[in-house]
Structure formats: C-alpha cells, structure tokens
Amino acid sequence: MNDRLHLATKSLKTCLLIGAVLSASLLVYSLLAGLLPLYGEKIRLPPLGRPVLAACLALVLLTCLRGLTLLDRLGSQVIRDGLTGLVGRDYARQRLKEEYYRAKRYEQPLSLLMIDLDSFRPPNDRFGRAAGDHLLKYFAGLVLGTVRPSDVAARFDGGEFLIILPNTGPHEAQAVAERLRRRIAESPFRIDAGREDVRLTVSIGASSMSFPEYGQDAEELITMADLALYQVKKDGRNAVSAGSAN
C-alpha cells in the first residue's frame, strides 16, 4: 500500500464516520419528532418546539462535522513534514513496520535508504534560514523525482532523510541509492540570480532484508542503514554503503 492509497483509505474512513454522524442525527430527530406530538402537551412544549429542536440538532450536527474536518486536516499535517512535504518521522516508522510484516508474510525483499545531506549547515549559516528551507524543499523534490510512487520518502531528522523501498532487494536498493546520489551531485541549488550555486552531496546508507532472514523487527533495517551511513561519513562522504541482514 503506497502513501496515496493510505491517505485515500484515511479519507474514506472519515467519510464513513461523517455518514454515521448524519444517520444518527436523522434517527434521533425522527424519534423525537414522532414523540413530540404524543407528549408535547404533557410536557407543555411550546408550538415552536419542533423547529427549535431541529435547529438545535442541526447546530450539534454542524459542530460534529466541523470537528471531523479539523481532525482530518490535523491528521494530514501530522503525517506530512510541513516544510518539505515528505512524510514525517513517526509516520515513516509506522509504515516501515507495515511494510516489514507485509514483506515477511509474502516472502518479499524490503530495503531502506538512510540519507544525510552533507554539509547542510554551512549554506544554512552562510545564506540564512530561509535559504536553508528552500534548499531542503529543493532536495525533497529531487528525492521524489527519483523514487517510485510505491516508495515512501520521509524527512527523518533535520538534514537526514529516509526512503522505504518495498519489494526491493539489496542490489536494486544500491542502484537506487547511487542514482539518487548522482542526481543530487549533478543538480546544484541556486539560491537566487545574484549568488553562486550551492553544490549538494549526500551520504547514503542502505539496508535490506529478504526471505528467509528478516531479523527481529523493522527497526533492524534502520539500525543497519544508520551504521552503513556512519561508515560512509567516516570514509569521506558523498558515497553509498550497504548493510544486509542476509
């Protein structure tokens, strides 16, 4: 299940919940409307009691619908990183667990890339925070333009990013990582017309699991990719290193 399908499923659940609220409100109104003629006089309900009741129910319904809309909007904001548009760290971890169990169940490979934007702080300090934010957006666009729709690209922490590659073995994962590394190295970031271009490089740690060795849990993929990334940075950066559970 890719990111778009996950969001579509979430929206469908919200629509079903809204439908349930509407149905419940109509049911309550129908019951009360049927009881009013029978017991209205006994409880001394004024003649305008039914319209007032309908207005109150409508107000309650609108309040519920407004709350559901806000919850749906907040849910989308939690899933997405506000700056880059990539998914956030918590959502990425949850998706990784889902993909791990899916891979294990269907005996499919699963890979992960941990990416660190080399020397992100110098441009950020030199040209200002706004330029640094634009750089991150630009970088996120390069990432999304390289991976498949079924892959999950996330901003993991600051200048560190993560890509989940479902049904992808170690050799394919390394090929994706190298293709991304080259594309970023060949795509300098232009701050504005009056300033020099900023050359970007990345260090990438890749990890993979495949049948029959899937390790203890999905977190092992992150640990292995992180160790591989550490080795790249130790050896000089702007390269790809791989670790595997097999």
Image: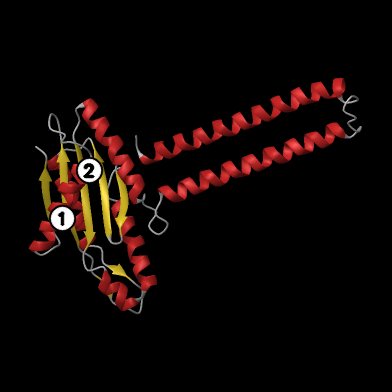
Residue sitting at x 28%, y 61%: 159
Q: Is residue 83 above or below residue 55?
A: below
Where the C terminus falls, by quadrant?
A: top left
| Number of marks in the rendered image | 2
Residue sitting at x 73%, y 35%: 57
Q: Is residue 230 above or below residue 223?
A: below
Q: Position of residue 173 (x, y in %)?
A: 17, 44
Q: Position of residue 188 (x, y in %)?
A: 26, 67
Amino acid on which the number 2 mark rests in the picture: Glu
Looking at the image, is mark 2 or mark 1 earlier in the sequence? 2
Residue sitting at x 36%, y 51%: 88
Does dot 2 land on a helix, a strand or a loop? helix
Q: Position of residue 204 (x, y in %)?
A: 18, 55
Residue 188 visible to an observer of this rendering: yes
Q: Which mark is residue 229?
A: 1
What is the basis of the colouring in this image?
A: secondary structure
What residue did someone put label 2 on? 219
Separation of residues labelled 2 and 1 (CA atoms): 15 Å
